[in-house]
Image (spheres, rainbow, N blue to C red):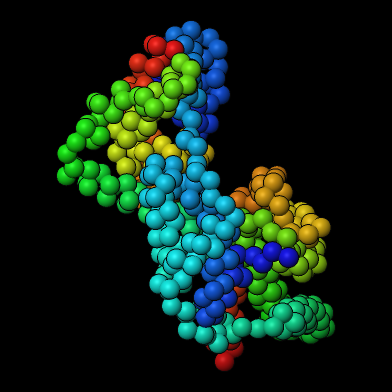
């Protein structure tokens, strides 16, 4: 029989640190998914997963048994991913090169794909979407990912980002408006 | 005609608008807004989540191995973090049974005391006995409402589970609740009777769950039974009962003071 998360948390707090491994195994896939969607980078997402579970362990005493462990660790992961995104943005400012020029990134098409025209077009759309997402601030991107891709409510987004519900709502609005503007050329072309 | 702005339409798209009925109605009649909404929906629909890279079943174990060395075990505690000693399950049942027994004894003692007081000659003695009985009833009822409130809070925040801790607690509360409901009905307390009646329906539902509660069943129960509303009702009643109890104690103290 599957042991309930709360029972495992109690066990960890009673000194059995290896029991935490069960919680990591149980929730790492969903944490990785949201981390990847926010950071947009596989290696960063792996790092976020480790950081989230590490922070979770260190703060386990503040975990309230009324809440679900999955929801709790998910919120920590969202925060870690947001911090990671902010760090990467700061680092990118100090890098110089073609790959960091947003204008160029928007029109870059991988020429290694020697498939049919449709594949190329779909690749271009995907790249434009990625570039459009990159143009958002970390908060806007995270709020949009949680709303649009993770199907979270405004209240849940606000709780995860530790901001007011109105601010969460505005972040989603701004993200949608920016994305629509960035992707407007696609609408004309398709 | 009032047109809805983009923010309203975005909220509507994500199903979070407070005016969804009005917007839906408006979109059926307004071509301009309808076109704007279609464009918005189409744009948002086109934004699909990127394919998440595959992580196999060992991913969790590998992650744990990477962080395991960075964490230290929590000190073994004899008591839980809530300050309660770690008890065996049978002890919990024994305590619950003991509590029920005390409640039952207190309740019947109250009733006996009431019958006994009828035979007393002086009006003061009769009044004192009534107040004593009411105090006992109020104390016991307060405890019952307190436990019910805890169960409703747990139900509100419950996660799907194959275990049935709520069911057992609901069964315990159900039998006591029937007694109190009957008692307050006879005492002519319609508000309290209605609340206990509502509580009884929720308790019956939870008590009859075959094994644990699924997420769907939890949502259904919370929606159907309006547990939020009931929780509020129980909180109000509990504070009212507590207030009544304090008034009774003050009155008794005053009466005692006069007698002396």
Examine the rendered structure and indicate whether residue B182 appears above or below residue B11.
below
Q: Nearer the viewer, residue A91 or B156?
A: A91
- Horizontal and vertical percent for residue B70? 40, 72
Q: Is A179 in front, or is A39?
A: A39
Residue A147 position, x and y percent, is 46, 38
Which residue is drawn at the image coordinates 78% and 66% (left, top)? B171
Residue visible at 53% across and 31% down? B15
Q: Is residue B156 left or right of residue B44?
A: right
Question: Can residue B91 be seen?
Answer: yes
Q: Quadrant of residue A168?
A: top left
Q: Nearer the viewer, residue A50 or A172?
A: A50
- Which of the image's four quarters has the N terminus of chain A? bottom right
Residue B180 appears in view? no
Instruction: Using residue A122 as the reference point, say whether residue B247 is left or right of it.
Output: right
Q: Residue furthest bottom?
A: B260
Give the residue drawn at x 48%, y 34%.
B49
Q: Is residue B240 above or below residue B259?
A: above
A93 displayed left or right of A132: left
Q: How many marks?
A: 0
* Image quadrant where residue B6 sits: top left
Q: Position of residue B13 (x, y in %)?
A: 50, 26
Which quadrant of the rendered structure holds the C terminus of chain A?
Answer: top left
In this picture, residue B61 sits left or right of residue B136: left
Closer to the camera in the image, B16 or A102: A102
Residue located farthest toward the top when viewing the structure as drawn: B31
Q: x, y percentage for residue A14? A: 54, 80
Residue drawn at (43%, 53%) of the image: A46
Image vertical order of residue A85 relative to residue A59, above or below: above
């Amino acid at each position: 029989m599957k042991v309930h998360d709360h029972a495992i948390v109690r066990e960890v707090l009673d000194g059995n640190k290896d029991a935490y491994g069960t919680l990591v195994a149980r929730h790492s896939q969903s944490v990785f998914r949201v981390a990847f969607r926010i950071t947009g980078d596989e290696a960063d997402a792996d790092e976020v997963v480790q950081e989230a579970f590490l922070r979770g362990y260190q703060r386990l005493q503040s975990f309230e048994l009324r809440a679900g462990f999955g929801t709790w660790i998910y919120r920590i992961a969202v925060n870690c991913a947001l911090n990671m995104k902010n760090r990467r943005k700061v680092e990118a400012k100090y890098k110089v090169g073609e790959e960091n020029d947003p204008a160029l990134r928007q029109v870059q098409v991988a020429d290694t794909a020697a498939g049919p025209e449709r594949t190329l077009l779909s690749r271009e759309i995907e790249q434009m979407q990625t570039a459009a997402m990159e143009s958002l601030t970390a908060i806007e991107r995270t709020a949009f990912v949680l709303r649009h891709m993770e199907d979270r409510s405004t209240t849940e987004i606000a709780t995860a980002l530790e901001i007011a519900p109105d601010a969460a709502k505005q972040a989603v609005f701004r993200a949608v408006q920016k994305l629509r503007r960035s992707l407007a050329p696609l609408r004309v072309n398709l | 005609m009032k047109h809805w702005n983009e923010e309203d339409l975005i909220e509507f798209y994500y199903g979070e608008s407070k005016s969804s009925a009005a917007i839906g109605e408006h979109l059926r009649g307004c071509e301009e807004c309808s076109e704007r909404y279609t464009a918005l929906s189409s744009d948002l629909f086109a934004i699909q989540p990127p394919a998440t890279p595959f992580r196999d079943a060992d991913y969790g174990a590998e992650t744990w191995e990477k962080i395991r060395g960075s964490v230290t075990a929590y000190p073994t505690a004899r008591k839980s973090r809530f300050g309660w000693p770690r008890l065996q399950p049978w002890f919990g049942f024994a305590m619950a049974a003991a509590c029920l027994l005390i409640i039952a004894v207190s309740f019947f003692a109250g009733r006996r005391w009431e019958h006994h007081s009828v035979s007393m000659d002086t009006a003061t003695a009769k009044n004192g006995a009534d107040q004593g009985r009411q105090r006992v009833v109020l104390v016991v009822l307060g405890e019952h409402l307190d436990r019910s409130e805890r169960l409703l809070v747990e139900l509100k925040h419950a996660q799907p589970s194959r275990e049935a801790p709520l069911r057992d607690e609901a069964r315990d509360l159900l039998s006591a609740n029937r007694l109190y409901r009957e008692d307050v009905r006879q005492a002519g307390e319609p508000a309290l009777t209605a609340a206990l009646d509502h509580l009884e329906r929720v308790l019956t539902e939870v008590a009859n769950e075959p094994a644990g509660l699924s997420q769907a069943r939890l949502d259904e129960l919370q929606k159907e039974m309006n547990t939020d509303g009931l929780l509020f009702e129980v909180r109000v009643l509990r504070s009212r009962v507590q207030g009544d109890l304090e008034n009774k104690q003050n009155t008794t103290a005053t009466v005692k003071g006069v007698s002396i």
